[in-house]
Image (tube, rainbow, N blue to C red):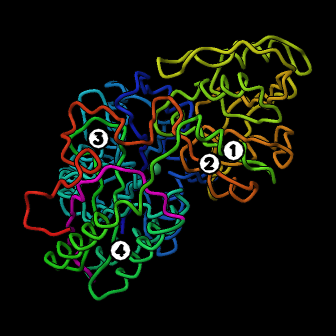
Amino acid sequence: MHLFIATLSTETNTFSPLPTSLQNYEDYFLRHGTATQEPPNLMTEALHVWRERAEALGWQVTESLAAIAEPAGRTTKSAYAALKGEIIDDLNKAGQLDVVLLQLHGAMVAEGVDDCEGDITQAVRALCPNAVIGIGLDLHCHLTPAMEDACDLIIMFKEYPHDDASDRAHEIFELAQRTATGEIKPVMASYDCRMISLYLTKEGAMRDFVQHMQALEQEHNILSVSLAHGFPWADLEEVGTRVLVITDADHELAANKAQELGRRLFAERHAVTRQYPDLDEALALAATVTDGPVVLADMSDNSGAGAPGDATYVLQEVLKRGLTNVASGLYWDPMAVRFCLDAGEGAEITLRLGGKVESASGSPVDIRGRIMRIADNVGQHLGAGLEPLGTVVWFQAENGVDLIINNLRIQVYHPEAFEQMGIDLSQKSLIVVKSLFHFYTPFAAISSKVIFCATPGRVNPNINEIVYQDRALDFWPAVENPFENEAVAY
Ligand SMILES: [Zn+2]
């Protein structure tokens, strides 16, 4: 057997004015066939799993591109041509292939191409008409007919925060192997839930839903069940939540199960989603907690969903209210990092921080303080994967606010983003993290309360407040019942 593997991943916020260029991939992770020679990250973990499994079976492995960019606006036309072109060139050079496995995101949008994953998988299918084609997707994907048409297998992360990349990669490999040897014939069907929302899978009704999906996978002839949560900050017709079921040669079963699950999710829509408090409400709530650190998620400035990462709305409010014993990060501000490098560790300076990148950044803040520490090439964990941070500065403002500033756009995943710089988070009253959910598990473990806050910014988590122009408004919560005109009771 001959296996081809590659990864291409970014999550495109079509509302963001920040272009995603080849440089953005180089800044984060760009390797040409060598990604498995380095420690895994979220999107290369599958390549490691697939290579190990294939080599254990004596298969030949051809490894192609691994390209990952922090979410921002559309990938530029030239960058997309180069990245897709490299995968297609490598496929052409590889010779006869039996299995092609790609770890993609599912919400990548380029200039002129709204569905990059559909475009790539269609091109792969045209080149390899008889190969087994399987893809892994982030659950924040836009599942499209083009992808379903081109692929034999599509499996998405089940967990948000995403801590199951390795488990899903093993499943894709196993099903691809069984397909290649003729043991199974996978067929897929999807169901549009007509919902756009965010679903945290670690507790409550959503936890039960994930466990139900896994229980279904044990039933006869059902090979895999995925939920495409969707990525709300893209103004595209395909944006939304969909169920995908793969069965062994039974399309009717796949379609029925997908519909059954989709209807269950819709019926539970109020239980599986939340409305988030604004900054005033969140800070009032934080003030009621006296027994240890409160973590406040600055959700709308999560660069992991395409926000700038340098917004100052929360910082301005913290300073205005005179709050002290606060830690806050990560501020993406390469210019401020440069000034701190110029001044050096220990120097006291007035820094103009944040508020620079785009209209959703707010205003810059001029703040006096001391450069406590500068560290280069440090990282932070997301699950088992180590994600880069670039050059990081701990800037201690003179009013008792510890700020973490860096020159690589990335959200906060782990307390070590602060603690490896020397900040003891257990002693803080308030910890403000620029992230939506990925920070949650390790920060919940070190705090007495986590408050999710719909701060002002580019990535508003209250879906009703997103202004779509191209996405039709026939989804919940834009309308109360998008199935109203159909003979389906809810
Ligand atoms: Zn995701």
Judge: label 2 CB < 8 Å from ligand 1.
no
Q: Is residue 384 above or below residue 299?
A: below
Q: Which residues are magenta?
A: 183-202
Q: Nearer the viewer, mark 4 or mark 1?
A: 1
Quarter of the image that includes the C terminus: bottom left
Q: Based on the picture, tell me whether residue 188 belongs to the magenta stretch.
A: yes
Q: In the rendered structure, which amino acid carries the disc numbered 3?
A: Cys
SS at circle 4: helix
Q: Of label 3 and label 4, which has the lower sequence position?
A: 3
Q: In the rendered structure, which amino acid carries the disc numbered 1?
A: Ala
Write down the residue under mark 4. Answer: 175
Write down the residue under mark 1. Answer: 286
Q: Circle 1: is it few (<14), some (14-19), or many (20+) Cα within 10 Å? A: some
Measure how far apart labels 1 and 2 are at the Cα level: 8 Å
Measure how far apart labels 2 and 4 are at the Cα level: 40 Å
Write down the residue under mark 2. Answer: 451
